[in-house]
Image (cartoon, grey):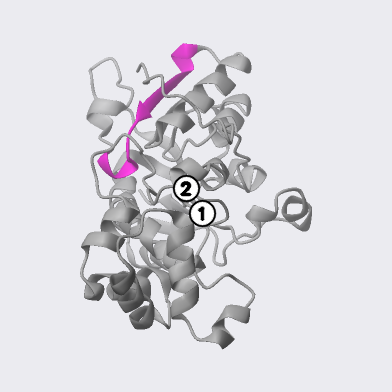
Amino acid sequence: MDLPETRLGESSPYHHESVLTEEVMAYLQPQQGGTFLDVTLGGGGHTLALLQGGAERVVGLDRDPLALQAARARLAAAGIPQERIQLWHLNFADFDPQRHGWRDEQGRPILFDGIVADLGVSSPQLDCPERGFSFRAEGPLDMRMDPTAAQETAADWVNRRPAEDLIDIFVRYGEERFARRIAHHIERSRPLFTTTQLAQVVWQAVPPAARRGRIHPATRVFQALRIAVNRELEALETLLAQAPAWLKPGGRLAVISFHSLEDRLVKWAFRTDPRWQVLTPKPLRPSKQEQQRNPRARSAKLRVAARLG
């Protein structure tokens, strides 16, 4: 499909290095041909690896129009023919094979040989202050993975939601032990419009001893807000429930997660849903070489399961 011509952020060109690519390819086995689904296209790294590795076709989804632009340019520069790819501006929770996938000669949706999901926020989103994902540089409190979507921003959450709602998401999505103190401090400091304003309020809310930790006191609050704004865990639950119906018998789902909440959902679904056969009893981690090359890969975990017949 044609994608909207959205201007890339001047402060941070879109460049995203996909993680655990070799491990994903080893499990999805694109050298045997087949049709694959990349539900988190990003900069196109996994999709390009699948196509160059032997896959016949790939359907790629991303809710971020900037990611789709970057992926389309990268695939074109690599000489990938248009007939081998379909790119959709879409949250994977809204994917429908009948509408968004390839069909056979009888018009029936073609089941996929493999699916890859690389969860969480991407480096370009973190590094672009205008997106509001990070407090390392001042930017608007946005945090929407799709900046064109008509949905609540992080600013809407911190300025309009009652303190009890903020406490709930800080505990549930950020596992923040000072959630109550932080939420009430936010309530007293409203309105807040920028990332640095929110980070400063969190800094002031926590006890002095908590300010000397390894990570900034606002890290878990920002994570929780991002997950809530984008309904990330709900989308992941939908994917895990629906993916078996999108796969051929024996087809594989590879999920890369970056924090414990995601990993727990994937682990639980793979172990309790009788449609899955677990292929990775323990999650795979990036090699030391990959972690040195890409420090943001350190927290990545890969789990893979195959659809049972």
- Which residue is nearer to you in this view: 218 or 291? 218
Q: Is residue 47 above or below residue 255?
A: above
Q: Examine the image and state in which quarter residue 54 appears.
A: top right
Image coordinates of residue 141 in percent, x first then y, are: 39, 52
Crowd rating for badge 1 (residues with CA inside 10 Å; few <14, some 14–19, many 20+)? many
**Location of the N terminus (image quadrant):** top left
Q: Earlier in the sequence, mark 1 or mark 2?
A: 1
Q: What secondary structure is marked by label 1?
A: loop
What residue did someone put label 1 on? 134
In the image, the segment drawn in magenta is 82-94
Crowd rating for badge 2 (residues with CA inside 10 Å; few <14, some 14–19, many 20+)? some
> What amino acid is at disc 2?
Gly
Q: Is residue 227 left or right of residue 163?
A: right
Q: Examine the image and state in which quarter residue 63 appears.
A: top left
Look at the numbered discs 1 and 2 and tell me whether their residues touch, using CB distance below 8 Å.
yes
What is the C-alpha distance between the residues marked 1 and 2?
A: 8 Å
- Which residue is nearer to you in this view: 120 or 238? 120
Is 89 magenta? The answer is yes
What residue did someone put label 2 on? 139
Q: Is residue 43 above or below residue 125?
A: above
Q: Residue at x 35, y 59 (%)?
A: 192
Q: Residue at x 43, y 42 (%)?
A: 251
Residue 263 is labelled as none
Q: Is residue 289 left or right of residue 94?
A: right
> What amino acid is at disc 1?
Ser
